[in-house]
Image (cartoon, rainbow, N blue to C red):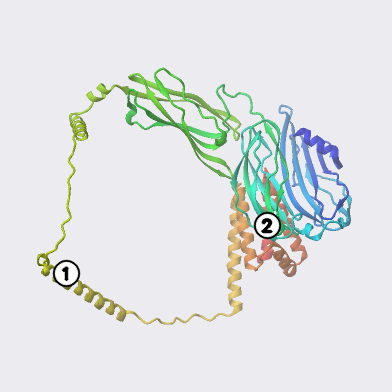
Amino acid sequence: MKQQISYILFLFSAVFTYGQVTLAISDVKDQKINQRFTLTVLLEISGENMEQQTPLQMPDFSKFDIIGSASERNTVVLDASKGNVINQLVYQYVLSPKQSGRIKIGSALVTVNGKIYKTEPFDITVREADKTNSVADNTDRNDLYLNLEVQDKVVYKNEPTIAVLRAYSRDYDNFRKLGKLHFPSQRNANIKPVSFAKSEIESSAGMASQIIGIFMIFPSETGTIEINPISATFANPAKENKISSNKIQLNVKKLPVGMPNHFKNAVGQFTIDLSTNVSNQISEINKPVHLFLKVAGSGNLGSLHLPKILNSENYSFFTPKVTSQTTANKNGLSGAIIAEYIVVPKIPGTVMIKFENFSYFDPNSKKYTDLGSKELVLQVKTPEQIAEAKTTLEKVNDYTNTVLETVNTPVLQTQNFIVTDKNQINWKIVVGNIALLTSLITLFAVVMRKREKRKLKPQLLSKPITTIADTEEMLRKNLSNHFEESIAYLNILKDNKDITNFFSAYDDLHRETKDYYAANTESDFRAFLEQNFGKQLSEQYRALSEQIQIEKYAPFHSEEQVDELYTSIKTLYSDINK
């Protein structure tokens, strides 16, 4: 990662360095309209006593379409005893110019220890697009992009990380043309799909986006690993094409020292259990016994090396049958792996069946946990010993079953007799049944007639007459009460540091506000805000939406950033719903 940062700094054109703070923005060459380019902003703070007091404020990107964005935060400890700590924050944006001419990219700002640091603004020249490109080509496939975003780019070997595949387009119809996803299989990483459910379409600065897939990546090697692009089919009237996402790089760290000698590759949090199908662990010599070794928890269950049974002269065993009961979700791969062994004891007496030691590395606590070796004690007996231990009643039952199995039981033959003589029919019984059936039908008719008479005629209830103004006032009051509850709930989630549910609660609040004002899309909502509340509030909403989208998938969330988001949400929606 340090080599990547050094390479980025070498390419930066506007770098502001003062003492222990470095703020830089990458150089951008001349571009064309609708041509994508990457802009990188780097903030590096060295020293234990250096405190970042404000979030990193980005330049104004209103003259660009934001195709995608990602962030990465790293902490490098050079010398803990001397307090030499470097905090690095890297933001990357994929932008596309909206217009031609000279466009100014402003300064990035940050406040550290009461002092404001900023980059120098610079201009880029945007040229007209080539006329050889057809309009249909520009608005069909070339207007649809896939961007693969990784939740955490710095992980340990075999530690899972979440990747989100998002599609970007100006045309909403392009999202319906996306087909099946194809993710690569590569030697140094395993990719497991979590969900292919598509999210709601979001719009920002004229560009719409939609999450079309969530994946889990398990790196199997250390160092810098490049994940190949994920592709998707894209249908057009002429033929079916494929589009691919960007490549991503993972910085896979080696596991720390101090691992147990028997450690293999378990990374996560696990428990282990051993059971058998025999009661009281009593079995018969040379008779098979089923053993079940279960490893449960969350982590790299898909590539986990299970502990094996140890060889012994006292028993023999067969290759186990391994079954997987796992579920992939946004927090990782959880569930259980079960290995079913068939063991045959060879000697009578006490037989101890032992397995290999099992240990795992917990990336949260950064410690190894040794669960030791699992063992099962069987009391093996000969057929004579089992027979002597039986009670008299059990012996009688066994003898009876043995006799029944050896005796040939005769098969009874039956014949069907057909009544041919009409005089043998008992007419009294037939007439009695008919009379009983007639009585039941008559009783049912009488009951139904009385029930219909008891039914009351419906009466019309008069409803109070309300005017349209009263109805609107009542709806506005309900919306205001619901808004106060939502803001209070956001405050609770913020204080509890429940960031995932914090963003989910904001999405619910935003969706309900749009529904109340009959705004189907983000563009309609921004137009409504500008028309009814002014352009300034509309720009505040646009800036808030971009900030939320950036922080929503950021690998780390500081308390200052979440507090600032909460204050902005409360202020903005209070103005909208007042």
Q: Can residue 57 be seen here?
A: no
Label 1 element class: helix
Does residue 465 lie above or below 105 as drawn? below
Q: Quadrant of the C terminus?
A: bottom right
**Residue that numbered label 2 is attached to:** 175
Q: Is residue 554 left or right of residue 103?
A: left
Does residue 123 lie above or below 403 as drawn? below
Q: Tell which of 157 and 15 is nearer to you.
A: 157
**Residue that numbered label 1 is attached to:** 433
Residue at the outermost top position: 313
The residue at the point 77 percent across, 59 percent down is 139
Q: Quadrant of the N terminus?
A: top right
Residue at the outermost left position: 423
Q: Say which of marks 1 and 2 sits in front.
A: 1
At which x and y percent is residue 463?
49, 80
- Label annotation for residue 541: none
Q: Amino acid at mark 2?
A: Phe
The residue at the point 34 percent across, 28 percent down is 281
Q: Residues within 10 Å of mark 1 (few under 14, many from 20)?
A: few
At which x and y percent is residue 118?
83, 46
The residue at the point 23 percent across, 74 percent down is 441
Q: Amino acid at mark 1?
A: Asn
Residue at the outermost front position: 420
At which x and y percent is residue 107?
84, 49
